[in-house]
Amino acid sequence: MAALVGTDLTVLNRKVRALVEKYIRPAENVRFCLVGTGGQSIVALDDRLLVVKTGFMAGATFGGRATSFDYADISEIGVNTGLMNGTLEVVTPGMGATKAADYWS
């Protein structure tokens, strides 16, 4: 799960920070950042959540992926933990929960 927590982008690795800086709007404020395995990160902004992955975790060896979710569109945030790892799943009406990610099924 989260290895680092911070209130600004300094906790993010260089690749993730560069990607996040491309997606942040000029007037947005960073509320907090969570950094997980392999640099996967969640960045909470004023009105939305950014989920950022780079490298192998994103399926892009030399690149990265970012997606954002407006808080008003989030219907659930699920946390599934195992012995060695865990997942955090953001669920919106257009993107339902995945059965494979559900630890309890």
Image: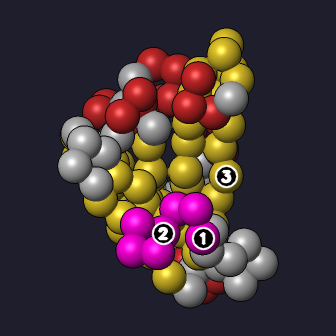
Q: Earlier in the sequence, mark 1 or mark 3?
A: 3
8 vs 57, nearest the viewer: 57
SS of the residue at dot 1? helix
Q: Where does residue 57 sit, x and y in percent of width and height?
A: 56, 31
27 sits to left or right of 38: right
| Cβ atoms under marks 2 and 1 closer than 8 Å | yes
Q: Is residue 102 magenta?
A: yes
Apparent side of residue 76 relative to residue 25 in the rendered image (left or right): left
Q: What is the spatial separation of the Cα atoms under label 2 and label 1, in whole angstroms?
A: 5 Å
For the residues carrying marks 2 and 3, which lies nearer the camera in this image?
2
Which residue is painted at 25% across and 42% down in the image?
Answer: 84
- Residue 22, x across and y down, in percent: 66, 36
Checking the image for residue 99, the label placed there is: 1
| Callout 1 amino acid | Lys
Magenta-drawn segment: 99-105
Q: Position of residue 95 (x, y in %)?
A: 72, 73
Q: Quadrant of residue 82?
A: bottom left
Q: Which residue is mark 3?
A: 67
Badge 2, how many Cα within 10 Å: few under 14, some, many 20+? some
Q: Amino acid at mark 3?
A: Thr
Label 3: element kind = strand
- The residue type indicated by label 2 comes to Asp
Q: Tell me the SS state at disc 2.
A: loop
Left or right of 68? Residue 9 is left
Residue at position x 48%, y 69% in the image: 102
Q: Position of residue 48 (x, y in %)?
A: 56, 67
